[in-house]
């Protein structure tokens, strides 16, 4: 569990050209920062975010903007506000991930019901599972609160791998000489 130390990220990037501002926003979102208001983002003060913060700061500099990191130990309801904002963002991500795992399992079931046992389809499904695995690693890297939804997501990902393994067996049985 992390302590209740937070980083406030104060960012200003000129509106034009917009590509610099968008690049900064994307990087901050990618590392898990949560916007509190225009130009103000929050993250737990945790080493897991250091590299991403450095990348975002470099993007701000490239766009001729300003970047300020503030160590924050909020008082009263402020700590709950920061924690809730960060937790809600992570929960949304975990829920989207588990929903995509469900779609993956449905896709495998559909291919089995259609008896579409081709190596091309198997390769496509393997790529889809690898995408899910990369996504899981990304989500896990920024879930420094260790939310219980991560365990649920891990179980769903394992079920996806089992479903693909079963499908792969059917493809090999159907296409390879006995």
Image (cartoon, rainbow, N blue to C red):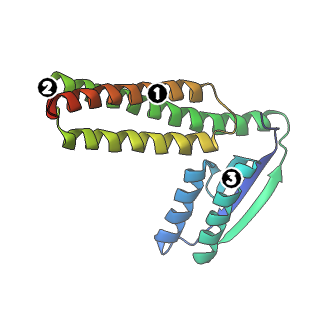
Q: Are marks 3 and 2 in contact (CB under 8 Å)?
A: no
95 left or right of 123? right
Q: Secondary structure at mark 1?
A: helix
When asked about the image quadrant of residue 66, the answer is bottom right
According to the image, label 1 marks what residue? 158
- Circle number at residue 49: 3
Which is nearer the eye, 171 or 164? 171
Q: What residue do we see at 46% from left, 40% from top?
A: 133
Which is nearer the eye, 73 or 166? 166
Which is nearer the eye, 125 or 93? 125
**Residue closest to the far front:** 178
User: Whole-Å distance between the Cαs marked 1 and 2?
Assistant: 24 Å
Mark 3, residues whose alpha carbon is within 10 Å: few (<14), some, or many (≥20)?
some
- Circle number at residue 168: none
Residue 158, relative to residue 47: is it above or below? above
Residue 78, horizontal then vertical, whole percent: 78, 38
Q: Earlier in the sequence, mark 3 or mark 2?
A: 3
According to the image, label 2 marks what residue? 114
């Amino acid at each position: 569990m992390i302590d209740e130390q937070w980083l406030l990220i104060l960012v200003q990037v000129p509106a034009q050209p917009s590509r610099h501002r968008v690049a900064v926003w994307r990087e901050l979102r990618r590392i898990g920062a949560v916007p509190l208001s225009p130009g103000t983002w929050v993250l737990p003060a945790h080493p897991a975010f250091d590299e991403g913060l450095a990348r975002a700061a470099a993007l701000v500099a490239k766009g001729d903007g300003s970047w300020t990191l503030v160590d924050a130990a909020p008082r009263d309801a402020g700590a709950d506000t920061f924690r809730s904002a960060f937790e809600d963002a992570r929960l949304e991500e975990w829920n989207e991930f588990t929903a995509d795992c469900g779609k993956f399992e449905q896709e495998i079931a559909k291919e089995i019901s259609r008896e579409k046992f081709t190596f091309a389809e198997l390769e496509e499904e393997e790529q889809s599972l690898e995408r899910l695995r990369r996504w899981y690693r990304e989500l896990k890297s920024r879930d420094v609160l260790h939310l219980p939804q991560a365990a649920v997501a891990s179980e769903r990902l394992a079920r996806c791998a089992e479903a693909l393994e079963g499908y792969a067996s059917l493809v090999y049985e159907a296409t390879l000489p006995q």
